[in-house]
Amino acid sequence: MQQNYFELFQLPVSFDVDAENLASRHRAIIARVHPDQFAHKSVMEQRVALQWATFANEAFDTLKSPIARAQYLLKLNAPELAQEGVRVSLPPEFLMQQMQWREALEEGNTAGVLAEVTQVQTDNQVQLRDACVQQDWAKLQVVLAQAQFIENFIAQLK
């Protein structure tokens, strides 16, 4: 299990992933390593199969999510920026936008805020892709922090 997630699924290391192709490759791997296939094998073989199935599921979950995929690409290409606890300075405009959203929520405009935040989330997905394509890992780190805030904020609104 020394492979990275892209190698496991025989995919190019890229932000752009064909979701159907990824799912098909995941199903093929799981069919080969699912623990049920090893029920009558040795304990060691069962353990290894379980480890492979767990690894494949973790890889699939990571690559199917744009935010998790971008985080993984950051980890592969700039691990120093992907470490836990690394402080990220968000742009002042984004911080002001957060304050405006909170003020609008206090005024009872939940639907308007949700619509605006959802649009910002869509724009943010484009920025994630662009930063990965450009291999601008410092920019990706900032865009990821924004994406995570937006995702959490939307979850709070719903």
Image (spheres, rainbow, N blue to C red):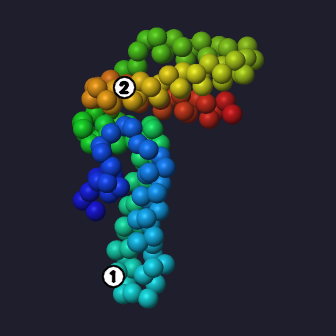
Hey, which quadrant is residue 47 in on the image?
A: bottom left
Q: Quadrant of the C terminus?
A: top right
Identify the residue at image location x=42%, y=58%: 25
Residue 87 in view, yes or no: no
Q: Residue at x 70, y 18 (%)?
A: 112
Q: For the N terminus, which image quadrant? A: bottom left
Of the numbered discs 2 and 1, the one sitting upstream in the chain is 1
Give the residue at mark 1.
44
Residue 31 lies in what quarter of the image? Answer: bottom left
Vertical arrangement, residue 86 with respect to residue 18, above or below:
above
Foreground label between 2 and 1 = 2
Residues under numbered marks 2 and 1 in contact, where contact means CB atoms less than 8 Å apart: no
- Secondary structure type for disc 2: helix
**Residue 72 appears in the picture as rendered:** yes
Q: CA distance from mark 2 to mark 1?
A: 44 Å
Q: Position of residue 152 (x, y in %)?
A: 56, 33
Q: Residue at x 46, y 11 (%)?
A: 93
Q: Amino acid at mark 1?
A: Met
Residue 118: percent from left, percent from top: 60, 25
Q: Which mark is residue 130?
A: 2
Q: Amino acid at mark 2?
A: Asp
Q: Residue 35 location, x and y as percent?
A: 45, 75
